[in-house]
Image (tube, rainbow, N blue to C red):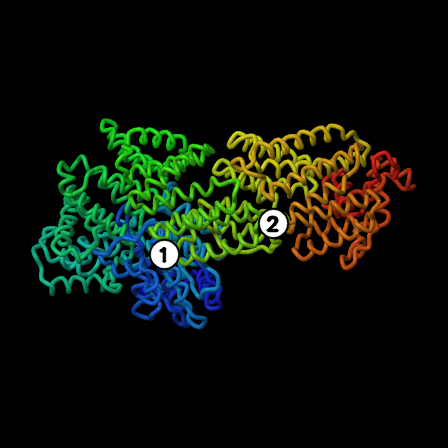
Amino acid sequence: MPAPVSVPFVARSHELDRLTGAVRSAAEGEPGLVLVGGDAGVGKTRLLTRAAELAQEAGAAVVVSHCVDLGAVGVPFLPFVEALTDLRRRCSIVDDVAAQRPALARLLDADPGAAPTSEPAGRLQLLDGLAAVLGGAGEPSSPLVLVIEDLHWADASTLDVLRYLVARLRDEHLLVIASYRADDLHRRHPLRPVLAELGRHPRVERIELEPFTRDELREFTTAVAGRPLDAAALDSVGRRSEGNAYFAEELVESGVRPGELPWTLADVLHARLERLAPEVQRLVRVASAAGRQVSEPLLRAVAAGPVLDGGATGGAETDAALREAVAQQVLHPEGDRIVFRHALLAEAVYGDLLPGDQAAVHRAYLDALLADPGLGSAAVRAFHAFRAHDLPTTLVASRDAARQAARVLAPAEKRRHLEQVLALWDAVPDAAELLGETHDQVALAAASAASWSGAPERAVHLARAVVDAHVGDPLRHASLQHVLAGYLLAADELDEMLDRTASALEVLPVDPPSRDRAWTLAMHARAALNLNLDDIARQGAVRAVAEAQAVDAPDVEADALGTLAVLEVDDAERSAELLVEARQRAHAAGDLETELRCMSNLVANRYYAGNLDEAARLADEASRYAQDTGMTWSVYGMTIRMFVLLGGYLRGELAAADPGPVPESWAAGYQALQLYPAVARGDADAVERGRALHPSWVVDGQIALVAGGCTVDALVWRGDDEEAVALAEEVILFLGREWSDSFLGRIWLSALALSALADQAERDALLGQDVAPLVAHGDEFLDAAVRTAERGRPRGGVLGPEGRGWLARVHAEHSRLQAAGGVGANDPELWAAAAHEFDFGYRYEVARSRWRWAEALVAAGDRDAGGKQLAAALADADAMGARPLADACRALARRARLDVVGGGARAASSDTLTERESEVMALVAQGLSNRQIGERLFISGKTVSVHVSNVLAKLGAATRAEAVSVAHQRGLLTVPSPGRPA
């Protein structure tokens, strides 16, 4: 618990109610995160302290942890280690989970001799372990309330845990309350994007703590002073404090008369310190150099020495000074730590030290840490060494801190410590001797850490500098290229990757075989594969397998086998066999990333072969394996997860799900994928959600394809046909530049565009307009789709079942477009072919094809067959919850006077429009003006205008033409065939 404050809690009742409500929700199995932000001193700690007290009174288990300010790096996972250490003393869940996840055990036990776990597997295992402990520690009668203070000082790994934890929230009895200083969040502060990401999650609530209002300030100052302040004093406190709780309290407690109140907070804080005895002031100043909090043993060790003009003191003197500082509410104890009452106080005290005094105190801390390393971590040692201007010690301590960060799987902190080493390298002449490492080794370790911490461009920069530094040593230069190649692959720098590995292979000796050459061959093959240079990729992968076997490198062999499997385009079964073999090799080598790559590719293999049941089984298995190994959020873990969602959509599982947020790098792609079922369900905001993803097109072409295509589909359902065609063309043009003119997704986009053109042509024909330009435009889409199917087949293989389905749909929609233009008929056989091709398991598209098939059969005079297809389509649409499709089926039944058994086709024909409104719309469809309609119906033009306005409102249409289209789609208006009277 935070140290209790002396002033009773007053004001902030609304914010406190929100926090206590969140605690009750957690008890009921509705977990959440509350982010409490506000300026320094505004009262965040006071609010959290009171909320924690009330939570405990209600039966909750409360754990309080802190982030500390150690510069740009920090101590990895500090608040969560602190929380789990507390929980470990209370219950067994921490040790139970740690027994199954070695990475978590290593973090808690901090064994310096333990070997690091491979990344990212171990890191994700660690994140999963932390989430499992926190999620499982609470109970219905006693939820866990975790309070994290000073999140603005959080290290990168702590923020990663928080994001991961929120993403995992389902029905746990857990509430996390985290506070941060809003005034510390400059534009590039690392917490800003995290707050933005978390804020989008429905289980995250944000409380912005504002300064006191005048009424709140009166209530607060009365509690502080023990009596109401007079009006002049209250005005003075309010003016100087600007409603800041801490400043107001210090002003009131300063004890001076209202006319003599100090003008600045620093003046107030100095006044408080000046009341302390000299030996207490010295202790407080020593403590300030460590930040807001310091371990008590370390503070005692430093205070016992001759620092800040004080002689060596004994334990009794330090005890007395410490007790007085606590009594005067400057410091207070929390566990084994001594904490300043407020961070502002620590900052003011430290800022008042002269530069020489600051360096001297940091030197004293460093000496204590060097004499007894158990007093603090290497990161703490590096912090004090740097501020004491001891660069050699900073260098060594930073390298040690990087190793400690690696052991607890904190790559971002590891990278920053290593980059500190690199920055100091030239300033420390004997750096290599001190570390026992070369500059290259440190730089490549930093590159690896950058890669795993999600900074691929930085990884490339670091590795490229190392490689190119050896351009004068051809063999060394060549042997390092495969290391750089891996980072280039992650950064999508494929041309450079191909060129560098090709140059390296010309230099690396063929005999004897070597691990460097094997990896270079494998990386060369990966580059060629991603650049669609299949012959080069195959040749390199075959040679890589042979070389890997010769040097007993199963990890290299698995990577190369995975590449060969992707290249097996003509034999899906052989490709699957290779992927299974590659996975076995990767598993034997302990290469979890390559193993998941193989599992992901195997799911894709079955999916694109049209074996959806097998793909679903493998995807579920792979998803569980990724979760069990803590790899859910890895690249391949997320790819597998997306296949799970896509497979569910194809099987007709359209219900909206709340999976929680995903990592920021995957958010747009995941949102795009969710548009498939959203459009099928008829979500009203589907178009807007698709448009919102437009800025992400440049990030990933797949986002452009999926989000763009789904938005086109939603526009077609909405009747915005011209906009749908324009967007389809925009996506095609964009991806033609990004990929090639023959990207396979163009077939899908062409089918959707043709559907929009056919709808528009039917509407325009109804109004007597010329539809020949629309038919000609459709001819262009048809030609492009056929050409794409011929040239854009995947890696020279056959078009998959989904591709064949969309190609059949292209031909069928083109037939419907021609029929609207009076050229031929809407051919039922083409729609039958589309339904057949989609029948590999794409339930929604089978139903949609049957709807159009029924329409074509009715137009051809075969009402019985049309009724059967329509009944099947309607039954499936209703079962899936595909509302637009179900509405369209019922509309067709009404137009065609089909009695679709069980479908309720006639029941809805009802009263959407009155009889007079229907008469008016029939004449609007013929292109008559209000005056002409009035003459026909013997009513005034003004009355016609009223009827038209009512119809527009009922149908949600903006124009008369749109109303005609919507009424036609809903079966409220009979459309005459071209050339035939109504």
Q: Position of residue 137 (x, y in %)?
A: 39, 67
Q: Which mark is residue 125?
A: 1
Depth order, front residue of 137/613: 613
Question: Disc 2 and disc 1: Cα gap in Å?
Answer: 33 Å
Please report the residue visible at 56 percent of the width from the left and 54 percent of the height from the top.
613
Element at label 1 = helix
Tell me if residue 700 can be seen: yes
Classify the position of the N terminus by image quarter: bottom left
> What is the three-letter code of the residue carrying label 1?
Gln
Q: Which of the 4 image quarters holds residue 35?
A: bottom left
How packed is label 1: few (under 14 Cα within 10 Å), some, or many (20 or more)? Answer: many
Depth order, front residue of 652/835: 835
Element at label 2 = helix
Classify the position of the C terminus by image quarter: top right
Q: Pick out the residue farthest to the top.
A: 472
Q: Earlier in the sequence, mark 2 or mark 1?
A: 1
The residue under label 2 is: 678
Please report the residue visible at 43 percent of the width from the left and 70 percent of the height from the top.
139
Q: Position of residue 970 (x, y in %)?
A: 76, 47
